[in-house]
Amino acid sequence: MVDRLKSLLAPPLFSTEEDNRIAGILNAILLTLLTASIVLTVIMVLFGNNLIAMALFVITLIISGCFLLMRGGYLRSAGIVVLLSLLLLVVFILVEGEGVHDLGILVLPIIIIIAGLILNTRMFAIITGLVVLSVGFVIMLEVNGYVERAVFTRESKGLEFVIFTIVLTITAVTIHLLTQNLKENLARARKSEAQWRSLVKNAPDRIAYLQQDGTIDFLNTVMDEPEAGVIGRTIYDYTLPAYHEVVRTAIAQVLTTGKPTSYEAIGITRFGTQDWYDNRLGPVKQNGSIVRLVMIATNISKRREMEIALEAEREFAQRIIHNMGQGLTITDENGRFIYVNPAYTQMTGYTADSLMGKTPYDIAPNSARTELHTQQITRQQGETSAYASTIQHVDGHILHVLITGVPRWQDDKFMGSIAVITDLTEQMEAEIERERLIAELESQNAELERFTYTVSHDLKSPLITIRGFLGVLRQDLESGDEAGVQTAVHHINNAAKTMENLLHDLLELSRVGRIISPPEATPFASIVADALWRVSGQSKAKKAQITVAETLPLVVVDRPRITEVMQNLLDNALKYTPEQREPLIEIGTTERAGETLFFVRDHGQGIPAAYQEKIFGLFERLDVSVEGSGIGLALAKRIIEVHNGRLWVESEGIGQGSTFYFTLPLAAAQDEATAS
Ligand code: ADP
């Protein structure tokens, strides 16, 4: 109940502090007036002054209305209405009563005080004017006899005391409100002043007011030290001369645009030390024109030092990255390149610009993609990884690399990776070459073993023959069998020849790979002609038909060796055509998978698939009925391989003929290789 009454009597709340202040005052005044008017109405009724009582009653109603008006938010309107009503009431009371001599005139100053408290200057002047006019109006009525002359009885009545009491009470309340208001405002201003002073004085920045020519009017750091001698000097006295122009431009800019600006400069303190400052300069306006400038300067020396240190560090790191021999790439969270160092562009053949926005997948060979993806996931999980992979050079060739990937993080968020790429191609190639050499050595060793075994075995048989026929020779000599001696000598001679051939072939074989004449560009046709000439004896005897392709390329080879190969293949083609048939031999080239293949084709006995590899082994022979050593093809293969070529046979099998294919460096291809 009390609470409700309290809240009913409390002033309503407004959004601004000024409105709340006025509402507080108006509320108190309205309550006082309401009480007073009710009391006065009752008193007037008791004293039989019904007309005044009626007027007071009307005023009571109006005050109540104003009360509601104020609560409805019409603060100033309520104030004006109540003041005008009071003024009308007073005029009415004066006219009805004793003119300007009536006690009611005491209310007029109260109206003026209230107006001063709650209205703005203009309305206050209007109300004051109206009060003065009202007094004039009453006096005019009085002079013209419209107001009854006051009759003073010399003795005061009880009613006068009551009216005085009420009027004085209202005056007291109003004055109290006035002083209260003044005190509150003063306290608030002092508090606010103290707060601002402390804030400005203790601000970490330098805050200054400058005149338009840069003269310092105020500086927070010396606000309590007038003896510091800063005030009155100019901002230029505290700025390194190199930056005076910057300051001048900034001041001019603020003055012309009316907008704040900022600049960085080296400032000099009043103690002579120098520091970097970030200065914000803004206008201070009064009535729309700039009267001063406010400057807030923050010491940024530490930041500057850090920036310089960071920049030096960044440059240092960049120099290392730029000049390191290994490739370095930085990718974003989507795996796209945002930086590649020169070593990487050199390694891959791509320009840095062309790689930006691409991902490592875009330039990886298919075979490396799955691994790249797996490694990317590993890094997204925060792990560093090192793995062997391949990348494809812009010209298509594959590089073997070792990649070390490190994830980049920022606030727990995966930002991409940094990868260091080491080119292992040379090492890998050296490794492959080493392995090839080892394999070659091993196969040569194996061959040597077989060779030693077979040589001792094969050399044995002519030796046995020789030894056998030496016995026969001795007997024939003893018995004087001339014919027998001839036969024995012939057999011994043959056996010795076989041994000689065998030893010759073996010597040849041992030389291949070691002794090779410098390759020279030679028309393959001339090699064919040489070889054909060498086998012309057998081919004529066998009535062989040999066709040679009309155009044959220029090859870069050790000519005598390749002639030997051709001689060997032709020899075999003639040898392994059954006696009853006339050998049919073709020599030429064909293109297969972009490669030129040389071939020697016969229509002879053919070679079963199972032996097509074997016959190239040392002493491997299929047909022992035909004379031979089993060294020819092994030798031919070795010679071709020394020329970086391949030699193999294709045959549909027994009776189907054979085609021996081989490759050789061509003169044109050699040129290209040299050019590149
Ligand atoms: P050789 O001819 O001295 O026996 P090769 O190394 O030249 O030794 O040949 C090895 C074996 O390969 C031969 O013994 C023979 O069985 C088989 N061969 C070689 N050329 C042909 C050919 N053109 N047709 C059928 N078989 C062949």
Image (tube, helix red, strand yellow):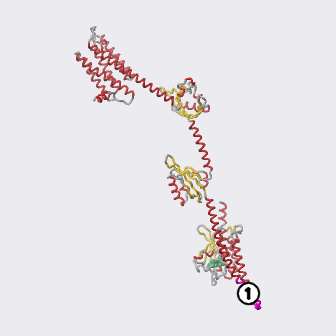
Front-lying residue, 197 or 319: 197
Relative horizontal placement of residue 632, taking residue 21 as reference (left or right): right
Residue 67 x/y as whole percent: 30, 26
Front-lying residue, 67 or 416: 416
* 572 relative to 476, above or below: above
Q: Residue shown at 73%/87% (left/top)? A: 471
Mark 1 packing: few (<14 Cα in 10 Å), some, or many (20+)? few
Q: Amino acid at mark 1?
A: Gly
Residue closest to the far top: 154
Relative horizontal placement of residue 475, taking residue 267 as reference (left or right): right
* 401 relative to 465, above or below: above
Say what secondary structure mark 1 lies in: helix
- Asked if residue 396 lies in the magenta stretch, the reply is no
Residue highlighted by disc 1: 471
Q: Would you identify the image quadrant in which residue 663 lies?
A: bottom right
Front-lying residue, 287 or 190: 190
- Asked if residue 475 lies in the magenta stretch, the reply is yes
Q: Would you identify the image quadrant in which residue 618 lies?
A: bottom right
Write the start and end of the magenta stretch as one range. 464-485
Residue 256 x/y as whole percent: 53, 30
Q: Quadrant of ligand 1?
A: bottom right
